[in-house]
Amino acid sequence: MVMGQHSERPWASLLDVFRKMGKRIFGYFEQKEAKAGEVLERDPSPGSGLQCRPPAAAASGPLFTSFDLPKAILLGIQDAGFERCTPIQERCLTLSLKGRDVAGQAQTGTGKTAAFLITVLDRLIRSGPKSGTNPSALIVAPTRELALQIYEDAKVLGGHTPLRMTAVFGGVDYEKQARQLKEGTDIVIGTPGRLIDFLKQKVLVLNSVQVLVIDEADRMFDMGFIKDLRYLLRRLPPYDKRQSMLFSATLNYRVLELAYEHMNAPEEIYIEPQERTVDTVEQCVFHVGLEQKLPLLLGLLKRENWERLLIFCNTKAGVEFLAAKLRGNGYPAEGITGDLPQRKRLRLMERFKSGELKILVATDVASRGIHVEDITHVINYDLPQDREDYVHRIGRTARAGKTGKAISLADERNVWYLEPIENFLGKKIPVVWFGEDWLEQDKAGRVRMPRKEPYAQARQKKERRSGSDRPKMMGAKKHESGPGRPDSGRENPQESPPVRSKGKKPRKRRAGQKEPSTVQAAASREAGAS
């Protein structure tokens, strides 16, 4: 009996352990669901969307009319729809309107573009009419899209001023841009490569620049433009003869070194460095399998009340695939990648800004180049591998005090990037659990991706289109005579160049070994004949 009692006790203790573990596990999931329900409450009715936390208040700083600005600039601010300053605008304008140099760290979409444009316009208007055709202000941006967006904002804010503005970037309109610079302009907005090109062609002269602005300075380092930027800065007037402003997502050591080397004791401005994202962006993440990823995206497009949507993928092939799938399911979507021709890129961006195109699928190359104010939703179809890219992606929505939503889909391939992103943000991204009724069937069927042409064929087509007289790389006659040909310097151009026999390769001589003389060579031939 005693033995029986002792033999039952281990089994009873194991059952108690399993009961306790079960209670803890089920209690953990119940608590997690309750927390998720507090943050994001699901509504099963289609089109209801995600009920997220109430948005934070919009810009509540001082009125722009409280600054001593010319009337023409105030009218431009009114046309842009601005009334009160954001924190970066308030702190920047307080210093920059007095002529101080500024190095500012601000989040994407906080209104820093308007801050430095208002400063530039105010400085040039107060300085009076200039003599000559050289520009008085230079604004440098890392990407073509960002330069074009700054140019569009400058035209709105300076629409009531007599100042002339020119956008200078690669890919399009070389002759048109050069003609505008020769005719004279007040403000030049461009990328480093095209600016240096015009500078070397002596179309652009920078010795009259009064105001310099460097936007997205950290991106200049990331994209390898820092040498080009330093080349431009060395062609400008001394730092004590001009006003300089620098803005960056992070004021790290490299950016501060650049600032103190080429600026006049700049005032550093930090806007809530502990907050990595704008509070008005409602964030959430779905844990989903690869086979359910596209059906879930289609379901979200039906449930969410979106007006303009930006979807990010990690690869060019992913962008093309997803854009084709969305079009096959009845959604007007286009893809934009880094190798897209500039004219087509500009047409797509114009359609997206005007509202004609509702869905744009992009890679990270466009994450800092797309500046559209009315993007209501950003969807990370693929989680970014770089944690900072997450901040730049979701910064495309909720711009200038507006609200927006950022939805991320974490599958088994890229869920590993979620923890570094949350550590970088300093907080957890709320998780939303979905049911089978959230999934929509894919009606597009199989998508055939366009085959890439071999490099040689693509090169030949490009040369035929350009009508170049240069010798072709593949399939060209290499030794034609005539002016400009490689063989035109030969005494008798009709003679063909010496052709090496297709036998064995000549034996290589060792270092220091002398070439055999003619006598030695003849003796070796005779010895071989005998």
Image (spheres, helix red, strand yellow):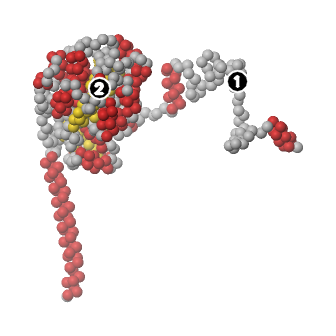
Depicted 24 relative to depicted 358: above or below = below
Q: Residues within 10 Å of mark 1 (few under 14, many from 20)?
A: few
Outermost right residue:
530
Q: CA distance from mark 2 to mark 1?
A: 64 Å
Q: Nearer the viewer, residue 501 or 37?
A: 501
Position in image of residue 151 (x %, y %):
28, 22
**Amino acid bearing label 2:** Asp
Apparent side of residue 169 relative to residue 279 in the rendered image (left or right): right
Q: Residues within 10 Å of mark 2 (few under 14, many from 20)?
A: few
- The answer to whether the residue labelled 2 contacts the one labelled 1, judged by CB atoms less than 8 Å apart, is no
How many numbered marks are there? Answer: 2
Residue 435 seen in the figure = no
Query: In terms of image quadrants, where is residue 257?
Result: top left
Depicted 17 relative to depicted 249: above or below = below
Q: Quadrant of the C terminus?
A: top right
Residue under label 1, please give it.
496
Q: Which tag, 2 or 1, sits closer to the chain's start?
A: 2
Residue under label 2, please give it.
240
Position in image of residue 50 (x %, y %):
17, 41
Position in image of residue 147 (x %, y %):
31, 26
Q: Which residue is at a point 79% across and 37% down the rendered structure image?
A: 517
Q: Nearer the viewer, residue 248 or 423?
A: 248
Which of the two discs, 2 and 1, sits closer to the camera? 2
Q: Quadrant of the N terminus?
A: bottom left
